[in-house]
Image (spheres, helix red, strand yellow):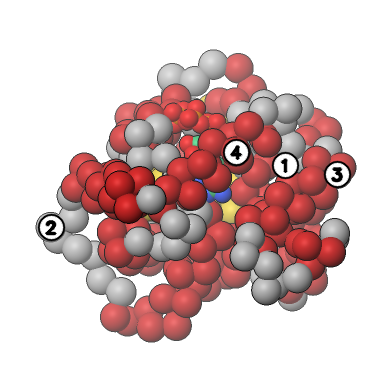
Amino acid sequence: MDEIAADPSHPRYASLLMRHRLEEAEKKGMLAGSAMIAHGRGEAFDYLLGEVTIPSALDATRHALASMIQGQRTVLSVNGNVAALASDEMLILASALGCPLEVNIFYRTPERMKAILGHISERKTALGLDVEVLGHAPNALIPGLKGPRAACHKEGILDSDVILVPLEDGDRCRALMEMGKTVIVIDLNPRSRSAREGTITIVDELSRALKNMVAMMDEKASIVMDAHYDNDATLDRALEWMLNTLKEE
Ligand code: ATP
């Protein structure tokens, strides 16, 4: 890693670390051509959040985690950027929840799938975790999606009732919603289609949101669903926060 990214006292350490992880993933062939652009869009919104977890995101995170704990067939979906940025947190969360991870990418090629599955397998071994990882042998299709991006596992995404889809694209988010699932989105852009389509949207940076979930799992018994949860209000609160940040500058 370069010297700036290796120095935790650098003011942009977290951001530089994420960029470094993407560069490494790119070298391994894990990313689609548009991965850096998608990340850049996220960074811009994170700047407006002040690169912190805001209170409405924490509320949404708690409610989302309670839904995942209660789910009968919870699944965590992983794409290239998620694998690059937060494989460890996804594996630790899946292990704590006792649910599978499924690699499910928009631009599916055998080479990218192999690179992502290989990376997750390495991290799983390094962490010593026993987590079921799906994606290698899709045997079902998500209704309403065309082409390879519809491919999924029946015992994973297809039959899930609660699904975490960080950094998901709007089409697939909508298709999953139409299947009647509880769809939990992590997306820094409160105006993206996924953010607006999802059941619960956490407007936060991926690795921060996952770290919060993992920490909350230590007090699992106190994590309960919010009967009055309102996703539109969550999105509005994030937008208001961003507007206030802009006004203060
Ligand atoms: P949609 O199809 O939902 O409208 P989009 O086309 O704007 O989404 P994509 O390129 O499909 O965006 O996905 C990238 C999304 O992920 C963007 O909304 C971006 O803000 C968000 N994003 C990128 N990096 C992160 C990150 N590290 N943490 C959280 N969100 C992120």
Q: How would you rate the neighbour count of disc 4 (Cα within 10 Å): few for under 14, some for 14-19, many for 20 or more?
A: few
Q: Amino acid at mark 2?
A: His
Mark in front: 4 vs 1: 4
The secondary element bearing badge 2 is classed as loop
Q: Is mark 4 within 8 Å of ligand 1?
A: yes
Q: How would you rate the neighbour count of disc 2 (Cα within 10 Å): few for under 14, some for 14-19, many for 20 or more?
A: few
Q: Work out whether mark 4 precedes mark 1 in sequence or the reverse, and give the earlier one.
A: 4
The secondary element bearing badge 4 is classed as helix
- From the viewer's side, name the closer residue of 34 and 119: 34
Q: Work out whether mark 2 precedes mark 1 in sequence or the reverse, and give the earlier one.
A: 1
What residue is at 79 percent from the left and 46 percent from the top?
Answer: 23
Q: Is mark 3 within 8 Å of ligand 1?
A: no
The secondary element bearing badge 1 is classed as loop
Q: Left or right: 164 with respect to 146? A: left
Q: Work out whether mark 2 precedes mark 3 in sequence or the reverse, and give the earlier one.
A: 3
Residue 201, how many percent across, how many down? 35, 48
- Placement of 126 over or under 4, stated as above or below: below
What residue is at 50 percent from the left and 72 percent from the top?
Answer: 214
Q: Which residue is mark 4?
A: 40
Whole-angstrom CA distance, mark 2 to mark 1, is: 39 Å
Whole-angstrom CA distance, mark 2 to mark 3, is: 44 Å
> Considering the image in quadrants, where does the N terminus appear?
bottom right
Asked whether residue 152 appears in the rendered view, the answer is no
Q: Is mark 2 within 8 Å of ligand 1?
A: no
Q: Amino acid at mark 4?
A: Gly
Q: Quadrant of residue 121?
A: bottom right
Q: Left or right: 165 with respect to 70? A: right
Q: Work out whether mark 4 precedes mark 3 in sequence or the reverse, and give the earlier one.
A: 3
Q: Amino acid at mark 3?
A: Lys
